Amino acid sequence: MKGVYIVGTGRSGTHFSVRLMNGFKHARDSLEGKENSEVLRDIAMAAIHHRLPSKSTERYYLDAFSDGEGVLLDQHHPNLFFVKHWTDILGDVVFLYPQRPTYQVVASMLRHRGVMGWYKYARKLRQRTINRIPYPNRFLGVEKSSDIEQLPNHLLCAHRVIAHRMAFHSTLCNANGALRQLNYEALVENPISEFERVFSTDEMAQLGPFTLTEEPKKASLAKYHDVLSDEQVSEIVTLEERSCLMS
């Protein structure tokens, strides 16, 4: 195992997951739980435009793997859409997808300006004849550009979370064990137990001894109440159930 990539929807616990993984002695994370802004934008734009990341991002990862010992950590989360691409280029990489209740992720998305900025970007490009965003869109999870204007923000975000989850499940079938689900709530409750479930004995040995570097905040599991009403939560759950029936 050369590296561990944390992938998924923004605000689903990707930062928290990689910060915890920094507690492994042999983990190597030069960005200390953050992202390279240029690389993140390139990968996100590739995902939203249904294309591959640039050659400069490819060089970034090749250099990162050759630049030290230990297990490389990365959390440019839109790499969810490029699991096969990076596996073909980089080899033995494990991709972890934090699974978190949709309404929790939506509440966190609504509080984060950067996450919501992609809808502004999509609105800006909707009239272009070149470099247009394709619809239905696998990253935003909407069928047509008018959905961005018409859907309330909590459902707009929910569509995105559900689309990422569907991408996870569709990729899982052909990932040959490289893509794995990390249960966010279990990670909050008992990090080392969840890591032991996800990684093999040999992989845990590669990562080395674990030290808890950040105390999980169990109150975070209920913070969605500060942002979403009970009615909005119910609407998100209904959308999720309908999407499961249609998939």
Image (tube, helix red, strand yellow):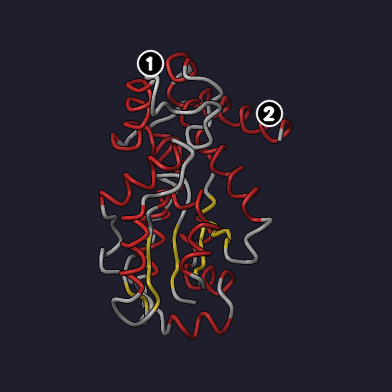
- In this rendering, the label closer to the viewer, 2 or 1: 1
| Residue 177 placement, left or right of 159 | right
Callout 1 secondary element: loop
What residue appears at the point 29 percent right and 37 percent down from the top-left corner?
A: 114
| Residue 175 placement, left or right of 97 | right
What residue appears at the point 38 percent right and 58 percent down from the top-left corner?
A: 75
The relative height of residue 43 versus residue 116 in the rendered view (above or below) is: below
Residue 231 shows in this picture:
yes
What residue appears at the point 58 percent right and 61 percent down from the top-left corner?
A: 180
Q: Which mark is residue 196?
A: none
Q: Which mark is residue 242?
A: 2
Q: Distance of mark 2 from mark 1, alpha carbons?
A: 31 Å
**In what quadrant of the picture does the C terminus appear?**
top right
The relative height of residue 174 versus residue 12 in the rendered view (above or below) is: below
Residue 185 shows in this picture:
no
Residue 63: image location, x then y, percent: 31, 69
Residue 220: image location, x then y, percent: 40, 48
Residue holding disc 1 = 127
- Residue 241 placement: quadrant: top right
- The three-letter amino acid code for the residue at tag 2 is Arg
Residue 165: image location, x then y, percent: 58, 44
Front in this rendered view, residue 162 or 101 = 162
| Badge 2: residue crowd in 10 Å (few <14, some 14–19, many ≥20) | few
The relative height of residue 92 versus residue 189 in the rendered view (above or below) is: below
| Badge 1: residue crowd in 10 Å (few <14, some 14–19, many ≥20) | few
- Residue 6 placement: quadrant: bottom left
